[in-house]
Amino acid sequence: MSNRLADSRAATTVLPAMHTLEGEGFEVRRAIPGPGFQSVGPFIMLDHFGPKEYGPGEALGAPEHPHFGIETLTYMFDGYGLHRDSLGNVSITGPGEAQWMRAGRGIVHDEGADPEAREKGGRSHGVQLWINLPRGHRNAEPSYKAIRADAIPELHLDGSIVRLLAGRLAGQTGPVTSFSAPWLAHLRAKAGTQLRLAVPDGIDLGAYVLSGGGRFGTQGKAAKEGELVRFARAGDSVALAVDSDLEALVLGGPPIEGALLRYGPFVADTKEELLVAVRDYQTGRMGMIDFSKPIPARPKVGVSALASV
């Protein structure tokens, strides 16, 4: 995947994701943060929800709530998610699609299954990631972008399929941009595949296994579904041997400087920032969601990366 792969990274640790509940009570596997670390590069949260099959009237979501000081990225593998926010955005995200939201100085949003899934049931599977906003950018203007499937570059490399959501790879650039310079790829590979994935040198880097399993890094550390591999910082590639059909996220970016303060959906550098964010939400300065706005139809999607490699 690169012509210059002299320096392959070592895998340092393999950690299981923590099981917890979110929103209306749906289960997630939280891989970031974990024991002894607050982030992998600018990614300060990784929640993996599903795969789960809901019956009619059973689908759950995360009702109206605020955010401050971060960006959120929701990426769907299966199912349809509905997003509404205090900027007036209303959209549905389907399989192979993503939605990016910059909370910045404050935003209120509501997310969950779309009306058809709530009525009829269906499968739900995806991830939500939080991207830290660095000092000087926490009060950026809120923004939202729906990322359709055809906007995500899809690369067929070394017998694998890589969808690039953020950063650069093999001459392609992912659609998610941020002040924090994240790097994020969705990888699928068949059992028996051996590959080296080119990555930016010097960034923090990790790989979260969504399904299957393999051996990562120069020592071939084994990791399976629901586990996060963390890598040494030096090196411009990651070696991977796939033991069983593998699906994984490889993610990272420049390391965060200093400790973060978290208070529920708010992330800040100081207590004063947190207090301002809480007050802004309580006094309505983050805005309100107009639930009377019409909901669009489900997008038509067709993504080869979601089929068998």
Image (cartoon, rainbow, N blue to C red):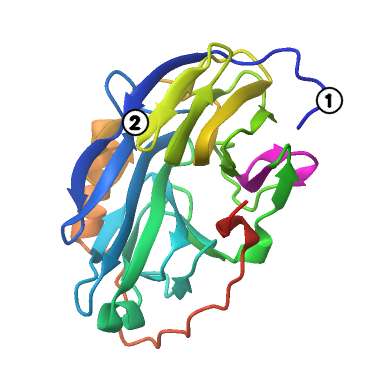
Amino acid at pointer 2 = Asp
Residue 28 colored in magenta in the image: no
Label 2: which secondary element: loop
Give the vertical position of 137 relative to 5 (above or below).
Answer: below
Res. 257 visible in picture: yes
| Residue pointed to by mark 2 | 269
Amino acid at pointer 1 = Asn
Query: What type of secondary structure mainly makes up the magenta span?
Result: strand
The magenta stretch is 160-172
Q: Nearer the viewer, mark 2 or mark 1?
A: 1
Label 2 crowd bin: few (<14), some (14–19), many (20+), radius 10 Å = some
- Residue 198, image quadrant: top right
Residue 166 colored in magenta in the image: yes
Res. 42 visible in picture: no
Residue under the image location 81 percent in, 20 percent down: 4
Report the side of 214 relative to 272 (left or right): right
How far from the left and from the top, in percent, is residue 262?
Answer: 26, 36
